[in-house]
Image (spheres, helix red, strand yellow):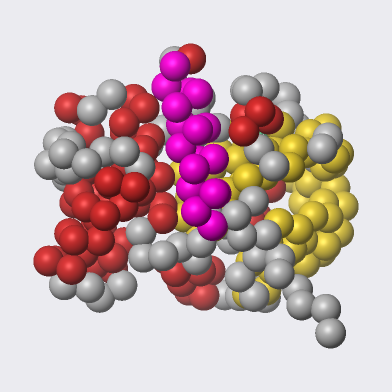
Amino acid sequence: MAVDVALIRTKDVCKAYRSEVETVWAARDVDFSARPGEFVCIYGASGSGKSTLLNLLAGLDLADTGEIRVGGVDVGAANERQRAELRLRTVGVVFQDHRLIQEFTAAENVALPLEARGLSTAQAREEALRQLARVGLAGLEDRLPRQLSGGQRQRVGVARALTGQRAVLLADEPTGALDSAATGELFQLIRKLCDEGVLAVVCSHDPRCRDYADTVYEVVDGRLETRS
Ligand SMILES: Nc1ncnc2c1ncn2[C@@H]1O[C@H](COP(=O)(O)OP(=O)(O)O)[C@@H](O)[C@H]1O
Ligand SMILES: [Mg+2]
């Protein structure tokens, strides 16, 4: 019997934005699957449909038609609470802006989703420190976001996205606000996390993302085209 090892699987996913004047097809017949440990780069020009696809995978938005399964959950059939649960347990999301809480230290930011899952403050801090060390920030856990560089802040965002053994990292232009050196370092970090078993889907218009990925898709007008 064949075992389905895909952690993400989509089938014929379509999504349109409709207004009185026009209909924009931002996702067309998107069909792909990805496995634990895989670094998937979704590459494409601005407006091609990258964020739309990522938001659908994260359950932050719903497809018009087609099916999306993430970690065994049928995202389209899940209600809002179940989709929030999916993000708390299985899928972590990182955006171009780090979205950290400015008044919280790095460790407190990373601990937040764990406390939401019912861990004690001490347990949550311990796990937060472990995740921060994993992204190369050991020793910086008590700094506030403004006391960190842009690249370090994104690493905190990655640590927060992965706390609590979440297996899927979804990143939307994670290097969009970073300089060239920090961009390479962040892609390298994501590569390392995938080598440890994380599945990462990274949307980027930075061509360098492709060099670190196992699988590259180009999005053109909402359609995924295989590049490797
Ligand atoms: N909320 C929205 N309402 C209407 N059109 C949208 C909305 N979000 C995205 N679009 C359109 O859908 C297309 C894909 O957008 P997006 O997924 O944001 O692309 P990318 O992330 O690759 O820049 C673009 O033409 C964009 O203008
Ligand atoms: Mg985008």
Question: Magenta segment, which residues?
Answer: 181-197
Magenta stretch containing residue 108, yes or no?
Answer: no
Q: Relative to residue 120, is residue 103 depicted above or below?
A: above
Q: Position of residue 2 (x, y in %)?
A: 83, 78
- Magenta stretch, main secondary structure, is helix
Q: Relative to residue 72, is residue 95 depicted above or below?
A: above
Q: Quadrant of residue 222?
A: top right
- Does any portion of residue 93 appear in the rendered image? yes
Position of the C terminus, as image quadrant, is top right
Q: Position of residue 163 (x, y in %)?
A: 35, 59
Q: Position of residue 32 (x, y in %)?
A: 79, 55
Residue projecting furthest to the top: 180
Position of the N terminus, as image quadrant, is bottom right
What is the tally of numbered marks visible in this picture? Answer: 0
Q: Relative to residue 82, is residue 17 depicted above or below?
A: above
Residue projecting furthest to the front: 195
Residue at x 22% of width, y 52% of height: 129
Query: From the viewer's perspective, is 96 left or right of 228?
Result: left
Q: Position of residue 112 (x, y in %)?
A: 25, 58
Q: Nearer the viewer, residue 210 or 195?
A: 195
Residue at x 41% of width, y 33% of height: 97
Residue at x 71% of width, y 57% of height: 34
Magenta stretch containing residue 194, yes or no?
Answer: yes
Residue at x 22% of width, y 41% of height: 138
Residue projecting furthest to the bottom: 1
